[in-house]
Image (tube, rainbow, N blue to C red):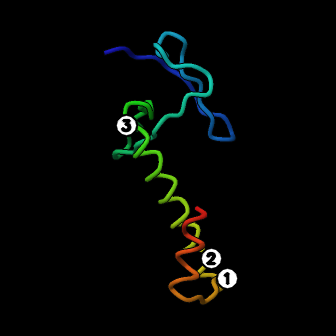
């Protein structure tokens, strides 16, 4: 197991030490998993396109629930909803 020390900025950014990056490159997408007091970083390419789509759907769903809770939602028919959902 390799160990390195880094720190978090005031914006929540961290630097992955060069010796730990392996084949990671600027712009690569990473999945961050919180398990107790541990953060696990994994390349999204390991999970495939489906996981990326699922994560995007989860973000949109969370945003929609927040808007609903704030009274910002609007009522629509099932057909209207399907038309809108196809655009996503």
- Residue at mark 1: 72
Which secondary structure lies at badge 2? Answer: helix
Q: Are marks 1 and 2 in contact (CB under 8 Å)?
A: yes
Q: Around disc 3, counting alpha carbons within 10 Å, would you say few (fewer than 14), some (14 to 19), or many (20 or more)? A: few
Quadrant in the picture for the C terminus: bottom right
Q: Are marks 2 and 3 in contact (CB under 8 Å)?
A: no
Q: Residue at x 37, y 37 (%)?
A: 47
Q: Around disc 1, counting alpha carbons within 10 Å, would you say few (fewer than 14), some (14 to 19), or many (20 or more)? A: few
Q: Are marks 1 and 3 in contact (CB under 8 Å)?
A: no
Above or below, comparing residue 63 to residue 9 in the picture = below
Callout in the foreground (2, 3): 3
- Residue at mark 2: 67
Q: Residue 80: x and y, percent?
A: 58, 82
Which residue is nearer to you in this view: 46 or 80? 80
Q: Residue at x 60, y 33 (%)?
A: 8
The alpha-carbon separation of the residues under discs 2 and 3 comes to 30 Å
- Residue at mark 3: 47
């Amino acid at each position: 197991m390799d160990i390195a020390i880094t720190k978090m900025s005031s914006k929540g950014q961290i630097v992955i030490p060069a010796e730990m990056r392996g084949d990671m490159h600027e712009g690569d997408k990473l999945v961050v998993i919180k398990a107790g007091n541990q953060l696990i970083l994994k390349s999204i390419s390991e999970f495939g396109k489906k996981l990326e789509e699922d994560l995007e759907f989860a973000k949109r769903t969370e945003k929609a629930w927040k808007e609903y809770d704030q009274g910002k939602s609007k009522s629509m028919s099932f057909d209207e909803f399907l038309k809108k959902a196809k655009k996503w």
